Structures are given as C-alpha cells and as structure tokens.
Image (spheres, rainbow, N blue to C red):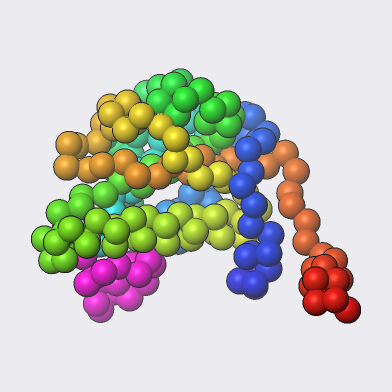
Amino acid sequence: MPIELAIALRRSIRRYRRGEPITLEQLSQLLWACYGVSEPSRRFLTTPSAGATYPLEIYVAIYPSGVSTGSGFLDPGSYRYDPYSHSLELVKAGDLRYSLYKACLDQPWVLDASIAIVIGAVFERTTSYYGSRGVRYVHFEAGHAGQNIYLEATALGLGTVAIGAFYDEEVSHAMAMPPSVKPLYIFVVGVPETKPKFSEEELREFIDRNRGG
C-alpha cells in the first residue's frame, strides 16, 4: 500500500470481529514498524530518537486465541519485544484482557481486540543526556512509534486505536513491567468489523469548496 494511501485511510478503529485472530506475520510486521531495526550497522530503529537513546520498551498482551500461528495460537500473556533479535520474551503468562480493560477505565474495545501493544519508556536513557528537556523527547518518540503502528495496521487491513486514558500502576502490574519502565501509550489491535474508505474525488471537491472554487 502506498504510504499516502495508508495516511488517507488511517482511522481510530474501535469495533473488531471478536474472536477473529490476527496472524503471527501481522504481529511481526506491527512490532517491526513500531520499534524494529531499520539500519543494522548503526543499530537504528524505525522511530526518530533524540541522540539515538531509544528509551522505549514495547510490551504486547497476547489475548487467548488472539494470534494465529497457522497450526495453533500464541500462548496468552505479556511479552516484551526485543527489537535487536526481533523476538518476544514471555514475562507473564495468562489472560490479561480483563485486567487491561479495568486499567483502561472499562473501554470495551480493549476486550474485543486480539492484542494490546503497550509502549513504555525508561526516561533516564534520554534525560541522562538532555536533562529535563529529554522528557518531551521521550513523548515525541512514543508518538512516532504510535503513528507507525497506526499506518502499519492500516496497510495490513487491521484496525487499531490509541488509548491514553488508563491507570499507570494497574497497567504496569498487568503487564509485569519493571519499575524503571513507565507506561505511556496503549494500542489495541484487531480485525475491524468494517474498513474505512477513501475517495480522492471527494477530497478534491472538499478542497475546491474550501478554496471558494
């Protein structure tokens, strides 16, 4: 999918086909787009990072029957993504849906999705170089990673929505994140009930009207 089409089709999707999994290949591509290696020789990742300090830590809640491997499903639980080996490490086994649902103020799409990607950060990696200004740089980076998730999900025909309303401590506990990692952003992902549409002609007519044409 051309990048301009992915941008045009990007939406916050809150209605999913509950019980329909995403594939392991789709999960792999989402995680790479979010925070994978893009230049091995310099260990650069897919997001701009102040001083290449890379403060983010990416965790994934795999729901029961949420990710198909072709011959079965990934075991449910909390996993940490390692970008340099492009692999997942299980840190907590079990069904985390309800815990995340409660931590996210009972937002129903948290229950209906297939997975939840939790973007956390170790602020000291960046603030040790940039002082207090580094806090905003970390927030910039979380936004970059989040937009990558949105665009990759769109390109894959999946749906996602960014969640910022949650109880930090409850998310950390549910995901078994260490104290040094602070949760910043959550993206639930699933197979959308309906897919967004985009009409170049409608956009052209809209712009013409607003130009007074």
Q: Quadrant of the N terminus?
A: bottom right
Taking the image as shown, residue 164 lies to the left or right of residue 207, namely left
Residue 37: percent from left, percent from top: 34, 67
Q: Residue at x 15, y 54 (%)?
A: 124
Residue 109: percent from left, percent from top: 58, 31
Q: Residue at x 67, y 36 (%)?
A: 15
Q: Residue furthest left?
A: 128
Q: Residue at x 29, y 72 (%)?
A: 44
Q: Is residue 116 above or below residue 77?
A: below
* Residue 95 visible in rendering: no
Marks counted in the figure total: 0
Taking the image as shown, residue 171 lies to the left or right of residue 130, namely right
Q: Residue furthest front?
A: 212
Most foreground residue, 166 or 186: 166
Q: Quadrant of the C terminus?
A: bottom right
Residue 61: percent from left, percent from top: 41, 35
Residue 182: percent from left, percent from top: 26, 42
Q: Which residues are magenta?
A: 38-53
Most foreground residue, 198 or 79: 198
Q: Residue at x 67, y 42 (%)?
A: 192
Q: Decide whether residue 44 is among the magenta residues.
A: yes
Most foreground residue, 200 or 38: 200
Q: Decide whether residue 110 is among the magenta residues.
A: no
* Residue 164 visible in rendering: yes
Q: Name the image quarter holding residue 38.
A: bottom left
